[in-house]
Amino acid sequence: MLSSPEIIGVSAVIGAIIISVAISLVFAMQLEGSSVVGVVLAIVVGSMLVGLAAWAGARISLQRTVPSVVTAPTAATPVSKPTLTRTLVAPTPTATATRTPTRVGADASKTVTIPGTQLWVDTGLTVSPGDEISIEASGTIIYGDPHNEANTAGPEGKEDVVYSGHLVLGVRRHSLVGNIADSPSLDGKGFFVGSSFRGVVPIASTTKQSGKLFLSFNDDCINEDRSGYNAYCWTGDNHGSFTATIAIVRER
């Protein structure tokens, strides 16, 4: 390919040749007596050829000097990967419910008298499993010969344990005893109360796990076969009484 100076030089040479040809024609025409119109025509043609040559040179020079603009493809913007954050959450431990009775104050309370002459005193209170029973007792009962001081007993009774003839078996004789039943019983079952007792129902060795609360003096007036009792033994021999204050807290 020709450079811009080379194209301009070529165009000048071509223009000069054309002008020389035109001038030669003019002289020739003058010598031969040609008309002026022919001369002018030759000049116009020569000028057009010179202009065309110059235009062609300019186009070639423009194509040579102006580079083609190539648009580079736009690079794709990289997509960043999302950052994954893993949060470990410790499992919340599951609480295990513990069943504990709530005991605030007494739901039922009563003070009763337990005479030495009565078999099983109905306290008028009923209890159910989970109830807490508290009993505080005092007093004195004289049994048998009233002149014999050895026959005097308080709620704690005598130290020896009885296994026959007494109202409740397996506990101290002539003590304050209790039982849970539907009615007065002679089955030998019950529990030792003494001067102070606290327990939660059910209580071991009672006739029933729930029912009426009975209290009594544990005397030895029951028949051996436990089919009945000696009424005179209760009413004729015994004197005095125990006093018991009972408080019951119900299970919530």
Image (cartoon, rainbow, N blue to C red):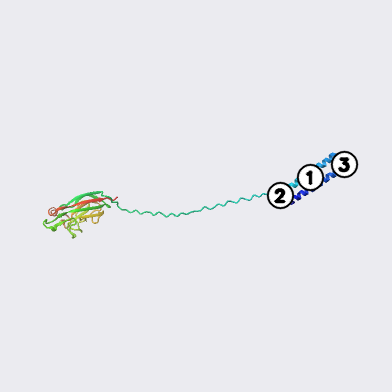
Query: For the residue carrying disc 3, how many other residues have a C-alpha within 10 Å: few (<14), some (14-19), or many (20+)?
Result: few
Q: Which residue is mark 3?
A: 30
Residue at the extreme front of the image, as rendered: 5
Indicate the amino acid at tag 1: Val
Mark 2 lies on a secondary structure that is: helix
Indicate the amino acid at tag 2: Thr
Q: Which mark is residue 65?
A: 2
Q: Position of residue 173 (x, y in %)?
A: 18, 58
The answer to which of marks 2 and 3 sits earlier in the sequence is 3
Residue at the extreme right of the image, as rendered: 32
Q: Which residue is mark 1?
A: 50
Indicate left or right for 78 with 69 as reference: left
Residue at the extreme bottom of the image, as rendered: 160
**Callout 2 touching callout 3 (CB < 8 Å):** no
Please state which of residues 23 and 169 is positioned toward the viewer in this rendering.
Answer: 23
Q: Which mark is residue 204?
A: none
Query: For the residue carrying disc 2, how many other residues have a C-alpha within 10 Å: few (<14), some (14-19), or many (20+)?
Result: few
Query: For the residue carrying disc 1, how many other residues have a C-alpha within 10 Å: few (<14), some (14-19), or many (20+)?
Result: many
